[in-house]
Image (tube, rainbow, N blue to C red):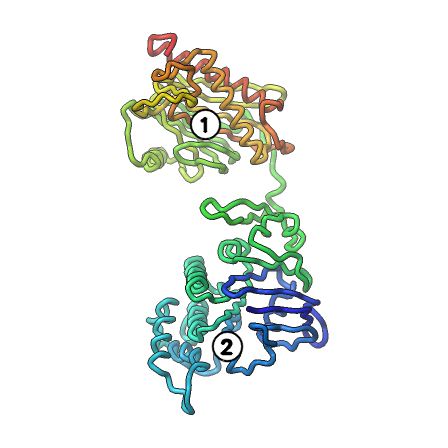
Amino acid sequence: MIKVENLVGGYNNNSIINGLHLEIKKGEFFSLLGPNGSGKTTLFKLITGQLPIQKGNILLSSKPISSLSKLEKAKKVAVLSQEVQISFDYTVEEIISLGRYPHQKGLFKQLSKRDLQVIEEVMEITQVTHYRKTPFRMISGGEKQRVLLAKALAQEPELLLLDEPTNHLDIKHTFQMLDLLKERQKSMELTIFAILHDLNVASLYADRVALLHNGAFLDVGGVDTLRKEGQLKKVYEVDVNTQSHPNVPKPQLLMTPNFSVVKEPFYFKDSYKIEQNDQYIHVRFNKPLRTISNGVIGEGIQWVTHFCNFHVDKNYHCSDPKSDVRRWMENDQIPYERAVGMMTAVKLEDMVVIEEELEGISMLVIVTAGVGNAVDITSSVKANRKTQVGTINTMVFIDANFSDGALVNGYMSATEAKVKALQDLQIKDSNSNTIATGTSTDALLLALTQQGTQTPYAGSGTTVGTCIGQLVYKATTLAVKKYLQRMGTHKH
């Protein structure tokens, strides 16, 4: 669709863009990225013809763009720049109607029925219809941006050039605009070339990206290019961490400010309080901890301050347990947005709390256990199990610094220790009569202070993994024995 060959250009014979090569395919959403001063706007102006080309070529559908007349170019290309300059006091509708000029015929260039139909359509999809008679100068910057997008779409271009199109838009209208462009891209094979300053937005919407650095491309490729943390740090000069979006297979970026790098150390044993009554166990830390859990709320990897295990009746059933846990937290003024919440039918007075220092590592482990619905996950015996709540809930707090990989390792170590405890206690799946590996509703939390040197591993072959295993095994064994004693049996 558009091809850039050995492009050189800039201002007053000063070359900002130096020998660029680029090809954007028809129907592609291509995003140009880079910090201020990297040459993004210069490249944009060279492509749009606002700056003269010092060397090289820009081809549009295999033809030099400079060989096209203004009318021919206007039929193929529409431009939406950051600059909002309208010399005359036009209404919104009059501004948008200017987009139909390349398609109008005859000496007087009157709007045809088709022109009016297109104008109505683009006003509706950009949500500016109600401003149609409003003077352009009277609307806000974000509204002006949507009007100018409507004007560009009214041209029915094959190629749309956008210079930071969401610059004046709030989050809602940013996503509305880009959703609209993606729909147009797919339904009409619209080719989009966009300068975007928000790397996360670019990752979500672009098909390919180019990273511009000092007037040259450092990298061009799919959005997974944005997973290259070292490269991004070089270009943007900030610490960058990449992670996957939870719902779409695209990377998202986290920037780390310098002020947060230096952390005040704190003494682990003085950093938390444990409150326990008939209704809940509540562990509150003075500092947020890095966590991994499968709690009812706060699941996944988070930063959390409050850790709760709520008691429920053994016949508890609810289609939306998250709402219940949130309500219970709100009733006790616990901020659920910064909490992990579990639930259990076990008597909370039977909880086991172990506070120990092993191999120089301070740890706190809290377990409540019931094995009424113990299961052997490897058993092929099918049974109509009645799901019960409570079972084995485990919280492990560690004064250490884990990578995300070590969090997963540690989670495995805690699980292995729980399984070993059930094996040694001869807890059985009542349906298969084989040794249980857990219960059908177990919950597990690992929480780290993130103090000290980061460790990338916490499996059974590491010191910290062994410490997790020893304390979880000990706490699980004691908690299950309490449960069996309360139930009046020594085996289940």
Q: Which residue is mark 2?
A: 85
Residue type indicated by callout 2: Gln
Q: Nearer the viewer, residue 410 or 430?
A: 430
**Res 362 quadrant in image:** top right
Give the distance between the C-alpha atoms of the residues marked 1 and 2, in whole angstroms. 59 Å
Q: Residues within 10 Å of mark 2 (few under 14, many from 20)?
A: few
The numbered dot on residue 11 is none
Count the labels in the image. Answer: 2
Q: Residue at x 57, y 46 (%)?
A: 242
Amino acid carrying label 1: it is: Leu
Residue drawn at x 42%, y 32% is 295
Q: Where residue 109 appears, x then y in whole percent? A: 41, 87
Location of residue 410 (image quadrant): top right
Element at badge 2?
Answer: loop
Asked if 241 appears above or below 444 in the picture, the reply is below
Would you name the residue on which mark 1 appears? Answer: 444
- Lower position in the chain sequence, tag 1 or tag 2: 2
Q: Secondary structure at mark 1?
A: strand
**Disc number lying in front (1 or 2):** 1
Work out which quarter of the rendered image holds the C terminus and state it.
top left
1 and 2 marks in contact (CB < 8 Å): no
Q: Position of residue 107 (x, y in %)?
A: 42, 91
Would you say 125 lies left or right of 209 here?
A: left
Residue closest to the far bottom: 107
Neighbour tally class for label 1: few under 14, some 14-19, many 20 plus, Cα within 10 Å: some
Residue 262 placement, left or right of 473: right
Task: Tell me the residue at 57%/69% (across/down).
Answer: 2
Q: Residue at x 60, y 36 (%)?
A: 264
Pick the residue in front: 139 or 200: 200
